[in-house]
Amino acid sequence: MNAPDTAAQVADALPALMGRLGAQAKAASAAMARATAAQKSEVLRDLAGMLRAHAGPLGAANARDLERARAGGLSGPMLDRLKLDAKTLETVALGCEQLAGMADVIGEIIGMRQQPSGIRVGQMRVPIGVFGMIYESRPNVTIEAASLAIKSGNACILRGGSEALESNTALAELVQRALAGAGLPAQAVQLVPTTDRQAVGLLIAMPEFVDVIIPRGGKGLIERISREARVPVIKHLDGNCHVYVDDPCDLEMAVTVADNAKTNKFSPCNAAESLLVARGVAPRFLPRIGAIYAAKAVQMRCDPEALALLQQALGGATGAGSDSALLQPATEQDWYEEYLAPVISVKVVGGLEEAIAHINTYGSHHTDAIVTRDHLHAQRFLREVDSASVMVNASTRFADGFEYGLGAEIGISTDKFHARGPVGIEGLTSLKYVVLGDGQVRA
């Protein structure tokens, strides 16, 4: 029997492993760029069927990941992200089918114009080539990334979190089976088969194989990738999303939107973390939303004006005074915070201008919403809030590729170039100029 590899031997083998994955992805990307729309749709439909048919084995693999994560002390919100339940599987399966039914944008030529010389100049949409995806916890990202890679004619190398290794491995095997079944290279979607962190450092430093890196996870991970990567990065650092309740507004709508944006799910990056309320509606609005948040055990970290209104309305029901009280005075840091938990910062503002200034100062440029009856206020909010998604009279929880009709998303970008907001098919493509002539030469 061979002796087990030492840690040093495993580390020495990593560069060869990552180089092999990179070379295979590069070769597969050429085949994916040639793939027909019918082939890509076949893969996606077959994959959707496989996800449903293999719900049992996928659930068992996920249960083992969850058991290890609990034993390792993983927190509630992170455990929530790790779950691969029937609802999640059905959502990603529907995403595959939605992508399959969408038009294939690869090869599309836009903006064709004839020039005085007689040549015609336009731009053709083409795949980026190979992207590397580094993500934590959520195994559904494996399918979202793979399905978007397939539809956009790219290859990808996926590196999921160590806590989801069994789930991600089982999902990636299904993807490769679907690719092979349609006559496309299985290596178009590859999962890094090790949890060694050195693999990440190698993946982000392979410009000869990888064209772009997309990190999706905690702020620490994304800061590290941004700092160390030798290839372009599509990223967002955090999701401090705001709901601003304007004066005037429909109070029923405002309560419904503010409730959903915060409590529909606490862990996603599009959950509201800050609630701003115009002074003119605060006395009527805050007691109502405060009662809902208190009933759902959401801690409210408030500026003095909001705190006074909520204490008057809710009183001892919130256990004021203890560290665990549902009403707390806000610190300066609270306005910057992405909680990913049943906590929200609350501030009363003078009106629209103060709300916009607060969001642009403290926000993360992810998703921000206004609830208003004033059309001009809505238009100003849309123009002046510097975020990837800006909403009027809708919950921030809609900031999602599936909800936007993109089929799926690779992540949400708060960058201002190439791709911004939920990154779908077009965000994984590039444009090249094409010139059509009839023998013209330049004078």
Image (cartoon, helix red, strand yellow):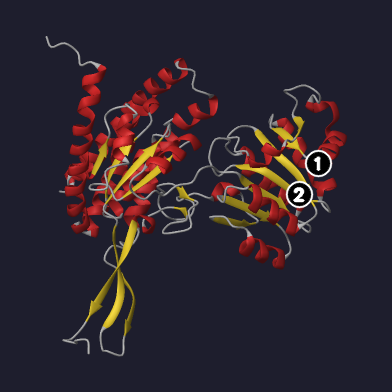
Residue, x 16% and y 11% (percent of image)?
A: 3
Can see residue 93?
A: no
Residue 110 position in % (x across, y down) = 34, 73
Q: Which structural element holds mark 1?
A: helix
Q: Residue at x 22, y 33 (%)?
A: 15
Reply above or below: 157 against 118.
above
Relative image position of residue 425 (x, y in whole percent) = 36, 56
Q: In the rendered structure, which amino acid carries the disc numbered 1?
A: Ala
Q: Does residue 65 show up?
A: yes
- In the image, residue 334 lies at what x, y percent? 68, 37
- Percent across and percent down for residue 407 are 40, 52
Q: The C terminus appears in which quarter of the rendering?
A: bottom left
In the rendered structure, find residue 306 and report the number of the disc placed on it: 1
Horizontal relation, residue 268 to residue 151: left or right: right
SS for dot 2: strand
Check if mark 2's residue and mark 1's residue have beta carbons within 8 Å: yes
Q: Which residue is labeled 2 in the image?
A: 277
Q: Nearer the viewer, residue 272 or 103?
A: 272
Mark earlier in primary sequence (2, 1): 2
Disc 2/disc 1 C-alpha distance (Å): 9 Å
Would residue 50 be found to the left or right of residue 322 on screen?
left
